Image: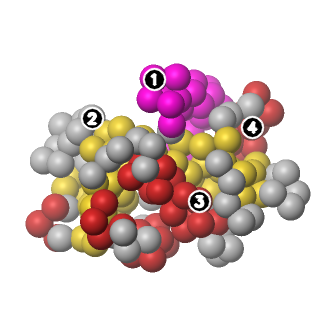
Amino acid sequence: METERLIMRRWREADRRPFAELNADPEVMEHFPAPLTREQSDAMVDRIESAFDEHGYGLWALEVRATGEFVGFTGLAWQTFEAHFTPALEVGWRLARSAWGRGYASEAARAAIGYGFGPAGQDEIVSMTAVANLRSRAVMERLGMTRDPADDFDHPRVPADSRVRPHVLYRLSRDAWR
């Protein structure tokens, strides 16, 4: 897929190094339990690619059209952990700091949501993040997603004593997207 400024594509071997660097950046990973090692980052790419093979869509690698620079990912991922709203299709993103503040997450997420409601045929798409992640929450709101505090939850895949365990949940229905 392409947007005005971005190419959303399957992953390449050359993406692994810059993705590992992004995942090792403490500022990028501030709202996650911990930065990732190179091995953990590579395993994540393998899981992402497996999801593409299974569903035909997933977390697309983001490339800036003008420069060819890999800047992270945006896309769709099935969340199946035990929670009151799962299974659910989530729109998510993770971008290198050099790509922050340019509107790339919103631009790519709009395209991903369009895919989710179009070819993927979903009626609802969610997004979630740690309570303190105000930048990602702002993206969710720009996308037209809404939050009901009653939906907030403790993420079961985050250690119980972690400051990032409390999560907010945003939702978007096909009708609201129209």
**Res 36 visible:** yes
**Res 40 visible:** no
Question: Of the residues under marks 4 and 1, which one precedes in the sequence?
Answer: 4
Q: Position of residue 37 (x, y in %)?
A: 60, 34
- Image quarter of the C terminus: bottom left
Which dot, 2 or 3, sits closer to the camera? 3
**Mark 4 crowdedness (10 Å alpha carbons): few <14, some 14-19, many ≥20:** some
Q: CA distance from mark 1 to mark 3?
A: 22 Å
Disc 4 residue type (three-letter): Asp
Disc 4 marks which residue?
A: 15
Disc 3 marks which residue?
A: 108
Question: Of the residues under marks 4 and 2, which one precedes in the sequence?
Answer: 4
Disc 1 residue type (three-letter): Glu
Magenta stretch bounds: 33-57
SS class of the residue under badge 4?
helix
Q: How is the image coloured?
A: secondary structure
> Image quarter for residue 157?
top left
The residue at 18%/70% (across/down) is: 148
Q: In the rendered view, would you say 148 is above or below 70?
A: below
Rendered image: mark on residue 54: 1
Question: Of the residues under marks 2 and 3, which one precedes in the sequence?
Answer: 2
Q: CA distance from mark 1 to mark 2?
A: 15 Å
Which dot, 4 or 3, sits closer to the camera? 3
Looking at this view, is 16 or 107 the one in front? 107
Reply yes or no: does residue 52 show up in magenta: yes
On the rendered structure, is 157 left or right of 104? left
